[in-house]
Every structure is written in structure tokens, then in C-alpha cells.
């Protein structure tokens, strides 16, 4: 394939990726966006394989076949509740790929056209260094995020004295090694900065608590994009550079949006200095009492309402209650009740988690609203039906300046006339604090598995 034709094909792939991002910005166009993404990747891969200096097609075919089988099996077997940890695991693969490509370029620079052994171009050394460092941080950071989400290690923040100064020291030594490698092409400098980057990835993620995992997933997505861009420079592949830059920048923008949704500092996210502070613990209910109800009680309240706002959370995802919830909404709408869905930007364990689940249950897109669009509607709502959400509805964020979630934008569920709260127990959310909404005079707690409770409400209706 000629250079001009390759450039045109890579440009076409880049346009497809941009259209994919545009499509993924809305649930109504997400499927089309995915198709553009698939088409763009197919064009990029085919164009790369058609380059005159590419060989070893047998090994490439074997590797692609193995990857395709593994990917297909995972896609068919994965549950939506496990999607966040799957995303984290896949991010780790991108990071490790960046490290391995940089290492291969270090020992076989002629194959990459960046110089000879011991005399790699200075610009290429810098590109290799950045790719290896970002990739290493992405790999170990994603592995820790996966372990926390999969409950292979505690989801609580892990902190120790002088943690941030140690992170700063690691960062400074890594920068020094990059300069050292760029000047002297020292193999020792390369592997030292890579090892420190692996360690820094762990150090940045372990102090982050489960409540902040949506931001972590988004930020690791950005890191994986920049790591891919680093690979692109080393491989001199235009498509990979463009894709990496798109993923990196869009992930960073999404992280910023998520930080605003949780009242977190974007700088603190990058430095790993956010999350629930050590020592934050659940507040005991003490002498507080709750008003518990049954499915029949909830059905009576719901069918006599004129407006119901449903607030889904991770508990709905765990119980796989989205289909039963849609059925309940259909029955209520048949009774003339207006039903809407309120989505907090960090509900669940990854950005868009609740939107995907509701879309899976064929909930109409025009009934689903983000926090900013629906918060003003709660005072006029007869019922707020909270299913599996917790921290994102906790009024302490507005009322208690000392709360770990103080200042975090929440859904104003407490302003509805009646609150029906589906939850297994009074246990706190990921932030580790009690939710005063449980004890409100206008709140009825529905203690049960979310799916079973909603199914019982449907029967009662």
C-alpha cells in the first residue's frame, strides 16, 4: 500500500473514531457510535497489515484468533454488574502493551526505524520513556482498581504516613530517569523508571475508596489513551496516535465532569490524593427509628401518585432489577402515573452504568434525566422511588460541612413528598456514612432484595 493511500485510510479511520465518540455521547445514538468505532478499527488494522514492512502474518493471525476467542467468550459471559472491573482489566492490557512495545524498541530499534542499538534518536527515547511510564502506571493502577472492584482486596482506602511525599519522590525520580535516558540512553535508567512507574500506579490507586471508583475508571481510561498514543509514536503509526489522543483527551474531560459530580479536585485525582479519609466510618443509627413497609404498602402509595421519580443505584445493578423496574413503570403509566428516572453522574461503579442498565431493559430514553435536568422536579414529585442508591441521595452532602461527601452534588430525593427506599439493610454506602434520609418522617424503607421487592410491587399493583 502506498504512503498516500495509507494516510487516506488512517484519516478515514480517525473520522470514524471521532464519529464514534460523538455517537456515544447520547444513548439514542450509542449503537451507531459503536458501529463507527468498529468500522474505524477494522480500517486501521487492515491498513497497518497492508504496510510493506509488516511480516509474520502467521503469528499475527494466531494472536488475533486467540484474542478474538477470548474477547468473544468474555463478552458473552460478562454480567453488567461486573462491567466496571472488566473495563479496569482491559485498561491494564493497554498499559502493559505500551511497556512491552517500549522495551522491544529499546532492544531492537532497527525494526522500528528509530535508530540503531545504542544510538536511538533522542526524540524516540523521550517517546519511549513517556509510553513506558504512563503504560506502567496504567497497568498496576488498573490491576488495583480491578482487585478493589472484584473484592479481591479491601475497597476501603489504604493509607500510611508520608504517602504523598513518597509519591512525589517517585515522580521526581521518574522524571530524572527520563532525562537520564534521553541524554545517555542508559538501559538502567529505562528499567528503573519503569519499575518506579509500576510502583507509583499502585500507590496512586490504593488510597482511593470505593465511592470514588467511577472517577478512577474514567481516569484510567484517559491514562490508557495516552499510553496508546505513546505506542503510536514509537511504532510511527498515525492511527494509533490519533486514537490514543482521542481516548486520552475524552477520558480526561469525562474525569473532570465526574469530579464535578463528586465535588472532587481534578488535580487530587491525578495525584491519587482523593477518596474517603482513613478513619471515616459508619455512623450508628443509635436511637433513630425507621418506618418499614411492605410491597403492598408501596404499591398503594405508587398507584395513588401522579408523578414518580425513580432513582437507580448500584443495588439495582447487583440485583439485576432493571427489567422488573421497567415492568413496574409500565404498570404505573397504564394507571396514568408519570414516571421519570433520575441518574446521578457517579451512580454505580463506572460512568453511564445506570444508563446502560436502563437501556438494556428498554426504558425509553426520553424518560431518563441527568441530575442537573431533574433535580428541580423533586419538590413537585409525589414519590421518589430509590432503588439501590445511597450516597448520591444523602442530604448530609448539603447539610453537614464535616461530612466526607460535603459539597457533593446529590439528587434532592428528600424534597419529594414521599420517599420509598429499597435497600437490604441500613448499612452505609461506599462513603462509609449513615444516610439520614432513612429516618425521615416521609421515608418508607422497603427492606428486601431489589428485584424481589419490585416484582412483589408489580404483583400488588
Image (cartoon, rainbow, N blue to C red):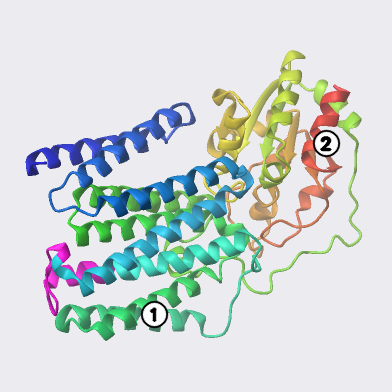
Q: In which quarter of the image is residue 456?
A: top right
Closer to the camera in the image, 175 or 54: 54
Give the label on residue 181, or none.
Answer: none
Q: Horizontal and vertical percent for residue 211?
A: 61, 58
> Magenta span covers which residues?
111-130
Q: Earlier in the sequence, mark 2 or mark 1?
A: 1
Front position in the image: 239 or 59: 59
Furthest toward the front, the residue is: 58
**Residues under numbered marks 2 and 1 in contact, where contact means CB atoms less than 8 Å apart:** no
Q: Does the magenta stretch include residue 124?
A: yes
Secondary structure beneath dot 1 equals: helix
Q: Quadrant of the N terminus?
A: top left
Dot 2: few (<14), some (14–19), or many (≥20) neighbours within 10 Å?
many
Residue 41, image x and y in percent? 31, 41
Pick the front one: 326 or 405 = 326
Residue topped by disc 2: 453
Q: Position of residue 258 (x, y in %)?
A: 49, 51
- Asked whether the viewer can see residue 397, the reply is yes
The residue wearing badge 1 is 196
x%, y% of residue 2? 8, 42
Quadrant housing the C terminus: top right
Inspect this view and state whether residue 406 appears: no
Residue 310: in magenta span: no
* Image quadrant where residue 422 sits: top right
Q: Residue at x 50, y 52 (%)?
A: 87
The residues bearing labels 2 and 1 have C-alpha atoms spaced at a distance of: 50 Å
Q: Going 46% across and 53% down the picture, which residue do you hit?
A: 218
Locate residue 31 relative to residue 54 in the image: left or right: right
Q: In this rendering, would 307 be left or right of 5?
A: right
Label 1: how many Cα within 10 Å (few below 14, some 14–19, many 20+): some
Amino acid at each position: 500500500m502506498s504512503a498516500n493511500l495509507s494516510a487516506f485510510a488512517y484519516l478515514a479511520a480517525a473520522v470514524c473514531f471521532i464519529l464514534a465518540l460523538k455517537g456515544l455521547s447520547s444513548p439514542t445514538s450509542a449503537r451507531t457510535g459503536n458501529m463507527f468505532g468498529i468500522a474505524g478499527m477494522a480500517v486501521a488494522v487492515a491498513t497497518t497489515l497492508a504496510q510493506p514492512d509488516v511480516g509474520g502474518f502467521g503469528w499475527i493471525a494466531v494472536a488475533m484468533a486467540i484474542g478474538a476467542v477470548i474477547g468473544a467468550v468474555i463478552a458473552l459471559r460478562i454480567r453488567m454488574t461486573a462491567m466496571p472491573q472488566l473495563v479496569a482489566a482491559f485498561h491494564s492490557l493497554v498499559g502493559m502493551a505500551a511497556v512491552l512495545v517500549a522495551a522491544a524498541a529499546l532492544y531492537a530499534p532497527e525494526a522500528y526505524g528509530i535508530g540503531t542499538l545504542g544510538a536511538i534518536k533522542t526524540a524516540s527515547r523521550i517517546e519511549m520513556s513517556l509510553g513506558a511510564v504512563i503504560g506502567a502506571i496504567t497497568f498496576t493502577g488498573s490491576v488495583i482498581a480491578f482487585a478493589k472492584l472484584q473484592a479481591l482486596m479491601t475497597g476501603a482506602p489504604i493509607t500510611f504516613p508520608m504517602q504523598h511525599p513518597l509519591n512525589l519522590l517517585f515522580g521526581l525520580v521518574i522524571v530524572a530517569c527520563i532525562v537520564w535516558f534521553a541524554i545517555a540512553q542508559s538501559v538502567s535508567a529505562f528499567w528503573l523508571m519503569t519499575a518506579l512507574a509500576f510502583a507509583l500506579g499502585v500507590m496512586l490507586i490504593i488510597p482511593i475508596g470505593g465511592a470514588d471508583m467511577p472517577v478512577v475508571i474514567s481516569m484510567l481510561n484517559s491514562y490508557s489513551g495516552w499510553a496508546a498514543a505513546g505506542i503510536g509514536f514509537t511504532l510511527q503509526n498515525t492511527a494509533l496516535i490519533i486514537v490514543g489522543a482521542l481516548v486520552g483527551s475524552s477520558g480526561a474531560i469525562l474525569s473532570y465532569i465526574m469530579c464535578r459530580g463528586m465535588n472532587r479536585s481534578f488535580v487530587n485525582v491525578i495525584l491519587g490524593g482523593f477518596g474517603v479519609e482513613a478513619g471515616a466510618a459508619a455512623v450508628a443509627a443509635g436511637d433513630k427509628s425507621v418506618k418499614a413497609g411492605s410491597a403492598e404498602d408501596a404499591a398503594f402509595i405508587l398507584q395513588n401518585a401522579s408523578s414518580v421519580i425513580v432513582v437507580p443505584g448500584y443495588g439495582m445493578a447487583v440485583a439485576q432489577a432493571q427489567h422488573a423496574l421497567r415492568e413496574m413503570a409500565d404498570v404505573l403509566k397504564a394507571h396514568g402515573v408519570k414516571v421519570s428516572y433520575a441518574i446521578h453522574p457517579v451512580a454505580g461503579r463506572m460512568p453511564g452504568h445506570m444508563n446502560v442498565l436502563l437501556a438494556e431493559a428498554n426504558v425509553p430514553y426520553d424518560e431518563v434525566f441527568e441530575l442537573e435536568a431533574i433535580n428541580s422536579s423533586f419538590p413537585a414529585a409525589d414519590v421518589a422511588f430509590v432503588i439501590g442508591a445511597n450516597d448520591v441521595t444523602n442530604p448530609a452532602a448539603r447539610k453537614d460541612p464535616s461530612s466526607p461527601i460535603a459539597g457533593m452534588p446529590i439528587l434532592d430525593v428528600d424534597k419529594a413528598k414521599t420517599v420509598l427506599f429499597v435497600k437490604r439493610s441500613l448499612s452505609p454506602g461506599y462513603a462509609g456514612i449513615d444516610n439520614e434520609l432513612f429516618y425521615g418522617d416521609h421515608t418508607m424503607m422497603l427492606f428486601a432484595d431489589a428485584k424481589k421487592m419490585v416484582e412483589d410491587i408489580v404483583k400488588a399493583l
